[in-house]
Every structure is written in structure tokens, then in C-alpha cells.
Image (cartoon, rainbow, N blue to C red):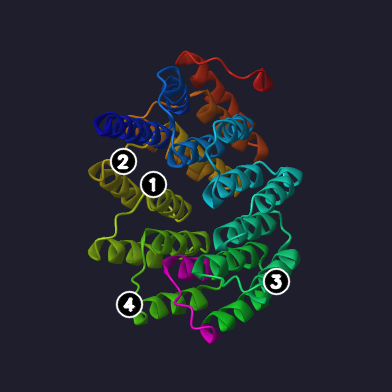
């Protein structure tokens, strides 16, 4: 009998592991079908299995299906725990279904589960992302009154809400509270504040955060560097951005496509094409292969900023490095020429587009 029980447990663990793997790999249908297969084979899922499936479905925006799994869970006699309800709350918050969030909270309470810090952080995040920072702050204060101790994630969530709205005074007040309550800021904390300053063009303040991070033993990461480099490029301080890029490489921080996009855009605006080509070589060395979308996004930004000549040079560079422009690439540049009133260049580009076998959008016919 014990061998049968052990074999059943192994089966449950194996199924749960594979189901989780499918969800993590974005194969939602395969994960759900495998879960259904357990029932067909008479293998009873555990609470962990149910939570894995509900969490995976909610993250895939299939909240209705997740709700069905919860009802099946209750019907089969498995008791939902706080994690079960938190997964559903996250799903409903992500899809903006506030009434359903309230319903799940009531259902959770009726089953004897009180909101924990994870629940509170989910609700706080929902309020902040909805732009309701005043309500979020009242909710944050109520957590302390109810003896639900906020953790660093709680502070970061509210901090990000303030940063997104550009409420720097509120952000500073919360930072003071973090220090007063002896909360240790993490990378995320620094990066939120750093982004707020950089996004507001307050580069000196952003640089100060860089120094503070190191003083606290928390070296800047790819997000920190990416944010600063992007801000410097947008301000036309491309040489400084390149210095930060070189420092980033020296410190062993791997730049991603976002960093390269910012730098190429900056170099284009100051007409440093040789340096831009060097960057493309670096991109390839990093195993990143820029496609037409990468170039087209940069071209659109340049055209929107009135840099259509630079956009044309980037278009030429795109062809030079072996990336074939698509209809959207041509259309973006055509739109830039039209906005600049340079119709002669626009017509020539239209002819080039037809010559290479691409059909123009109806807008340009």
C-alpha cells in the first residue's frame, strides 16, 4: 500500500514539475492539457499543482479558466491557501477587473484567510498602475495600522508609483520613511529613484544615486546603466554616454538591445556614423542580431525629432550591414520626408521601394 502511495506522490510531483516547465516556457495550452490528463489518469493534483496551474493561467491572462480550476479544486476537496487566492488576485488586477478582486478578497476572508504582505503588495501595485497614488498611500498607511509590516517590495511599489507620476516630493518623503524604518533598499529601489531623476533630465541627481549605490555595496546593473545612457543620449551628451558604456563593459555588466538602441540613436543625432558601425559590430559580438524592427524604431524616433537626413543615413547603414528594409522601414522614412516637405526625396524613395519589389501602403499611392 505504501508503495502505491509513494508512486502516486511521485507521479503528482512529476506532473507538477512538467506543468510548471511548460508554463514558464510560454506553452500554456500544453501545460493546461497535461493538467487535464492528470484527471483522466486518476491522479489527484495537490494544492501545489492547483496553485501552479492557477498562477500560470493568470499570468497568461486566462483568468476565467483559472477561476474554473479553483472551482474544480474546491469540488475535489483540496483547500485553497493564501497563495491560491493571491494568484487569482494578481490575475484580476492585471486585467483591471476590480470588482472581481473585491469578490476574491471576500471569498478569501470567508475561508479564513487574511491578507498577507503579498496580497497587499498586489493591491498597492494595482492602485499605483491605475494612477491612484493618493489611494495607494492611504492603503499603505492602513497596512501599518493593521500590523501588516510593509517589506522592501511594498516600498518599491509605492515608490515606482510616485516616480511614474513625477511626484518627486512624495518620492523623497517615502525615501525618508525607508531610512527611518531601517528598510534596506535593494537594486530595484535605487533603479526606481535613478529612473525618476534621469527621466526628468536631472542627470546630476541621477549620478549621485550611482555613487550612493556603490557606497551601499550595490553596484549599478544593466538597468541602471541603460537608464543613464538613454537619458544622456536624449540630452545630446553622447560622449558621456559612451564613457558610461565603456565603464559598463569594463565592470562586466552585459549591455542589452535597449542600451545599444539608445547609443545608436544618440550617435545618429550627432552624425558619428563610424562609431555607430563599431557599435553594430559590438552588437554582433554580443550575439545580438539587429533586425528591421530595430532600425525602423530608431528611424521613426529620428524622423519624429526632425532628423530625417540622419534617418536616411541609418537606412543606408541598415542595408550596408545586411539587414533588408521592409515596407514599414520605407514607409517610416517616406513619412519623415513628407513631414519635412522634402517631396523630391520622398518620390525617389517610393520609386526605390517599388524597384526592390515592395508594395507601398495605400497611404502613399
Separation (CA) of disc 1 from disc 4: 27 Å
The Cα–Cα distance between marks 3 and 4, rounded to whole angstroms, is 32 Å
Query: Marks 3 and 2, Cα distance to the nearest angstrom?
Result: 47 Å
Quadrant in the rendering for residue 15: top left
Mark 4 sits on what residue?
A: 217
Q: Which residue is mark 3?
A: 142
Front residue of this view, candidates 92 and 231:
92
Q: Secondary structure at mark 1?
A: helix
The residue lying at 40 percent from left, 18 percent from top is 41
Residue located 23% across and 44% down the image: 285
Q: Secondary structure at mark 2?
A: loop
**Spatial separation of the CA atoms under disc 2 and disc 4:** 30 Å
**Looking at the image, is mark 2 or mark 4 nearer the viewer?**
4
Is the C-beta separation of discs 1 and 3 under 8 Å? no
Query: Is residue 284 highlighted in magenta?
Result: no
Disc on the earlier residue, 1 or 2? 1
Disc 2 crowd, CA 10 A, few/some/many (<14, 14-19, 20+) = some
Residue 231 vs 3, above or below: the answer is below
Residue 93 location in percent, x, y?
65, 47
On the image, numbered disc 2 is attached to which residue?
Answer: 288
At which x and y percent is residue 318? 39, 35
* Magenta residues (range): 179-193
Q: Going by the image, does 70 lie left or right of 227?
A: right
Measure how far apart labels 1 and 2 are at the Cα level.
Answer: 7 Å
Amino acid at each position: 500500500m505504501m508503495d502505491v502511495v509513494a508512486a502516486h506522490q511521485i507521479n503528482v510531483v512529476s506532473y507538477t514539475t512538467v506543468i510548471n516547465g511548460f508554463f514558464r516556457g510560454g506553452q500554456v495550452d500544453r501545460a493546461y492539457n497535461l493538467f487535464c490528463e492528470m484527471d483522466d489518469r486518476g491522479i489527484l493534483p495537490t494544492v501545489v499543482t492547483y496553485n501552479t496551474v492557477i498562477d500560470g493561467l493568470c499570468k497568461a491572462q486566462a483568468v476565467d479558466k483559472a477561476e474554473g480550476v479553483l472551482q474544480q479544486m474546491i469540488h475535489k476537496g483540496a483547500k485553497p491557501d493564501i497563495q491560491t487566492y493571491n494568484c487569482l488576485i494578481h490575475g484580476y488586477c492585471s486585467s483591471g477587473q476590480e470588482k472581481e478582486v473585491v469578490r476574491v478578497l471576500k471569498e478569501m476572508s470567508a475561508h479564513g484567510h487574511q491578507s498577507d504582505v503579498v496580497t497587499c503588495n498586489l493591491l498597492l501595485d494595482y492602485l499605483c498602475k491605475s494612477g491612484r497614488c493618493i489611494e495607494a498611500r492611504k492603503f499603505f498607511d492602513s497596512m501599518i495600522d493593521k500590523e501588516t509590516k510593509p517589506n522592501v517590495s511594498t516600498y518599491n511599489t509605492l515608490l515606482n508609483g510616485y516616480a511614474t507620476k513625477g511626484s518627486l516630493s512624495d518620492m523623497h518623503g517615502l525615501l525618508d520613511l525607508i531610512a527611518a524604518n531601517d528598510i534596506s533598499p535593494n537594486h530595484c529601489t535605487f533603479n526606481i529613484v535613478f529612473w525618476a531623476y534621469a527621466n526628468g533630465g536631472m542627470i546630476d541627481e541621477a549620478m549621485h544615486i550611482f555613487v550612493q549605490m556603490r557606497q551601499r555595496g550595490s553596484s549599478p546593473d544593466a538597468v541602471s546603466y541603460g537608464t543613464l545612457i538613454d537619458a544622456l543620449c536624449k540630452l545630446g551628451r553622447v560622449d558621456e554616454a559612451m564613457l558610461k558604456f565603456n565603464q559598463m563593459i569594463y565592470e562586466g555588466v552585459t549591455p542589452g538591445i535597449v542600451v545599444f538602441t539608445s547609443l545608436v540613436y544618440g550617435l545618429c543625432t550627432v552624425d558619428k556614423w563610424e562609431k555607430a558601425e563599431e557599435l553594430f559590430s559590438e552588437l554582433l559580438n554580443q550575439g545580438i542580431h539587429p533586425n528591421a524592427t530595430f532600425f525602423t524604431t530608431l528611424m521613426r524616433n529620428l524622423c519624429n525629432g526632425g532628423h530625417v537626413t540622419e534617418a536616411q543615413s541609418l537606412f543606408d547603414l541598415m542595408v550596408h550591414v545586411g539587414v533588408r528594409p521592409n515596407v514599414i522601414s520605407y514607409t517610416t522614412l517616406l513619412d519623415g520626408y513628407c513631414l519635412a516637405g522634402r517631396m523630391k526625396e520622398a518620390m525617389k524613395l517610393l520609386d526605390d521601394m517599388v524597384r526592390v519589389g515592395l508594395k507601398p501602403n495605400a497611404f502613399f499611392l
